[in-house]
Amino acid sequence: MYKYKAGLNHYKPIDTDSLIQNINTKEAKYLQHVLYENAITLVQNNNDILPLQNIDKLHLASLSIGDTLSGTFSSMLSRYARVDQYFLSKNYKKQEADSILKALGKYEYVIVALLSTNNLPAGNFGIIHKSLDFIDTLQKQNNIILNVFANPYTLSLFKNIECIDALILSYQNNIYAEELSAQLIFGGIASKGKLPVTVTPELPLNTGIQTDSAIRLKYTLPRELNISENDISKIDSIALNGIKNKAYPGCVVLVAKDGKVFYNKAFGYHTYDKKLPLLTTDIFDVASITKIEATTMAIMKLYDEGKIILNKNLEFYLPYLNGTNKGHIVIKDVLAHQAKLKAWIPFYLETIKKGIPDPKLYSKVKSKKFPFRVADSLYVRKDYPDTIMKKIIESPLNKKKEYLYSDLGFYLLMKIVEKVSGQDFYSYLYENFYKPLGMANTGFRPRERFKLSRIIPTEIDYAWRKQLVIGDVNDQGAALLGGISGHAGLFSNAYDMAALMQMLLQKGEYANKRYFKASTVDEFTKCQFPSNKNRRGLGFDKPTLDSKEAGPCCKSASALSYGHSGDTGTYCWVDP
């Protein structure tokens, strides 16, 4: 009778068209995300090693044990720091295991992901004894963080489990578990889960260590921040429209709010021939963003430590400027682009003779005399950087002290950083910012460290280098300096830039490490000379003073916001 009342006597087959899409709605995906975030359990955390901190002092590796390498887990780890990736088949041969053990011996911590599991108790949930034996051997050699993507009862299979430095149970082997487990390791999320069953007397029901709130960027879904799909689709539309109109062949867009990355997408390809799809991990020549991601960071640090005074003249730190028209220029005016400097100097033009690079200045092969790579088969003389600095020093000044964006002062600021710090420019930045922030994809001369397939080309240079520029700095002046300068030359990716800008948003603190005093961040990011009709901060760009004027950001950005753009199409902006 009840079946009749329910209408079951009128059979209607289920429409299976788009069934998978109908089941896996945005709401369902977010629910799974929330469930896994709250379920993943930190079972053991000896000496409170998780979340990992002071990563500049750690040499990290990740080992995936299973049928295949986990791209999701390893990819998420690499968003936070440099983590060298290794893989061991669960049916490994002794020679393979011995080789991996030897290779892992140099690391302080090894993050072990036990993958390719199942829900069948009869077969130990897909975990074989060889895997358990290897993990037991490894924990005697290294500090290990073991991440088990399996049923809770698998924990009873491990030998000497109490000796494992940190133990995470992620319950299942899927994209949600892998992404969130990697975030837990680095503090993108806090640990909240508890064991739903008693595994052993030592691991009873409700075992689970709770950690404090997140200390690094969290990667989440828009729904967590009550951001609508309509808003997200607008970003998609703008990015795709740029590709359609050939403004660029591809791009990466990352957006974060309240320390949570909710939008992170790659569109298009490296080049217009559409051979290589663009990935969110790809590396860009950020051009003039170098001014804030490198030079301004260094000046802020030295100012913060009382080693640089912003109202001092350049000659105070660079005595060789004494007697030149650059000597009395104030550092603060350089940073705010009102030092009367010319916008730029096309140095490369004087190195071209009859339409080709001058053979007196360039060589097709690298040598002691021609050490600086400019492009493929093009190396510039060792002494040419001196020529560039001479031209900058001897260049005339503008008559009026007003806002005029200039590269030239940032060449000199790099020299001040090196003089005051006693280190070369990149070493200072790497030790004080890039390494502790986990910015493993940021630096100069990326060809020396990364595959070309990860680096986005900038242009086909018809005027000078006569080739596609890829992995060599696009800016001509920086290229003639060997790829390292204070105004351009840096390469980075969206993840690294997001970490740096989040640190600034948090007033100079990130992952429980302080980089600047809050007052230093406030000083550099505020508009310095509004009475001179200059919108700039110190190094940072700012919204226009007159809202009717076209500016570097949208009209809705607050007066407190700041950022920078790069001539290669790169851009970063934050709003407190």
Image (spheres, rainbow, N blue to C red):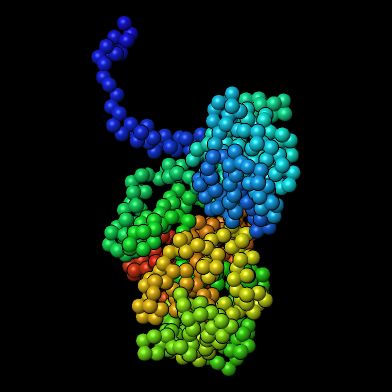
Residue 33 spot, x, y in % from top left: 48, 38
119 to 229, vertically: above or below = above
Residue 117 spot, x, y in % from top left: 55, 33
Residue at 37% x, 32% y: name it: 23
The one of 196 and 412 positioned closer to us in this rendering: 196
420 to 559, vertically: above or below = below
The one of 143 and 321 positioned closer to us in this rendering: 143
The one of 191 and 146 positioned closer to us in this rendering: 146
190 to 293, vertically: above or below = above
Residue 524 spot, x, y in % from top left: 54, 68
Residue that extends furthest to the bottom in the rendered view of this protein? 323
Residue 519 visible to an observer of this rendering: no
423 to 173, vertically: above or below = below
Quadrant of image for the N terminus: top left
Please state if 290 lies on the left or on the right of 82 as rendered.
Answer: left
Residue at 53% x, 79% y: name it: 366
Residue that extends furthest to the top in the rendered view of this protein? 1
Residue 338 spot, x, y in % from top left: 47, 80
Image quadrant where residue 307 sits: bottom right
